Amino acid sequence: MQRHPLRKIVRSLLLGVLLSLSPGLAQAAFSFTVSDLNFGSVNLLGASTYDSTATVSISCTNTDLLSLTYRICLNLNAGGVPATGSTRNLANGSSRITYQLFQDANRTVPWGSNTSTGFGNPPQVNLLVLPGATLNATRTIYGRILGPQATAPGGLYTSLFSGAGGANFTYAPLALATACSNINQNPTRPQFTVRANVDRTCNVNALPMNFGTHGVIDSVVDATSSLSVTCSTGLPYTIALNNGETGTAPDQRRMTRGNQAVIYGLYQNAARSRVWGPAADQGVGSVGTGAGQTFPIYGRILPQTTPSQGVYNDTVVVTVTY
């Protein structure tokens, strides 16, 4: 009759010992920070590529009595601007530009997420943390913007990574889960911003003007050319043409050969009634659309004393002011 109470006491002591050991399976404190990713100023009228980086900083302190290896899954979703398929976006009001995040410096492996699988897989980091030790690690996020994205108006474009739609870093002891798709424990959501400043700018291309071959200049000789201007959407601009290398006025430009010259003029209209020159009231104005805008140039040589035979030429500088 005296044995039963003793058995009950022994069992309760054993149970107490087992319960005191179980919390020690995952005693580690993690913290994460992510620096902002700033592309700086970008000109998206052409096919240029713009790269930048951000840094994920990881700190882990192990308060367990055992060495533990943890697997950390660094999930990055779309951020504060909805994605276009598998491509992330930056926003300036209702305007968008696209960019992408990668795991490697060559920008070949997308940086993805368990919950936004269209971006690809998240990178994983394995850390062996000794008892009582603190271990720090970093991982680089590689960003890239591809041009052209010419229709984007100039200005600051951003995406804030915050909350469930931003970064979602999870971790667990490696013994409990081997794949990031199975690691949903301990979600941490550090905040950071991706930004780029799209230049308000213009590109210009001009074609040469050829008046052809003539024996004598005893009648009017006309020719045409054109130039193409691509400016940021909504950007007002003005195109001016200087008077050439030795000209004195828009209709007194000089094609030269040695010390001899052929006088000619450049005009805005086919009737050759509006000169195209360097003065404020002699230019052609428009507003950028993000696409190339073509402007014809009309040239005219009036009858004049014909100089000696040979090739005559001049260089005219095109200036786009915006």
Image: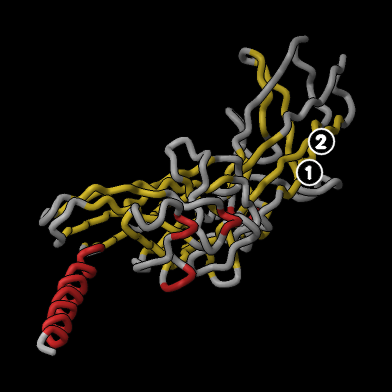
Side of 24 where 96 appears, left or right: right
User: Which residue occupies 55% across, 55% down?
Assistant: 322
First in sequence: mark 2 or mark 1? Answer: 2
**Disc 1: CA contacts within 10 A as few (<14), some (14-19) or many (>=20):** some
Is residue 94 visible in the rendered image? The answer is yes
Q: Residue furthest right?
A: 219
In the image, residue 185 sits, relative to residue 217, either above or below, namely below
Count of picture labels: 2
Please state which of residues 123 and 300 is positioned toward the viewer in this rendering: 123
Which label is found at residue 224? 2
Q: Picture coordinates of residue 252 (x, y %)?
A: 68, 35
The residue under label 1 is 296
Q: Picture coordinates of residue 157 (x, y %)?
A: 49, 62
Q: Picture coordinates of residue 296 (x, y %)?
A: 78, 43
Q: Picture coordinates of residue 10 (x, y %)?
A: 13, 77
In the image, residue 212 sits, relative to residue 227, either above or below, namely above
Q: Are marks 2 and 1 in contact (CB under 8 Å)?
A: yes
Q: Secondary structure at mark 1?
A: strand
Amino acid type indicated by mark 2: Thr
Side of 257 where 310 appears, left or right: right
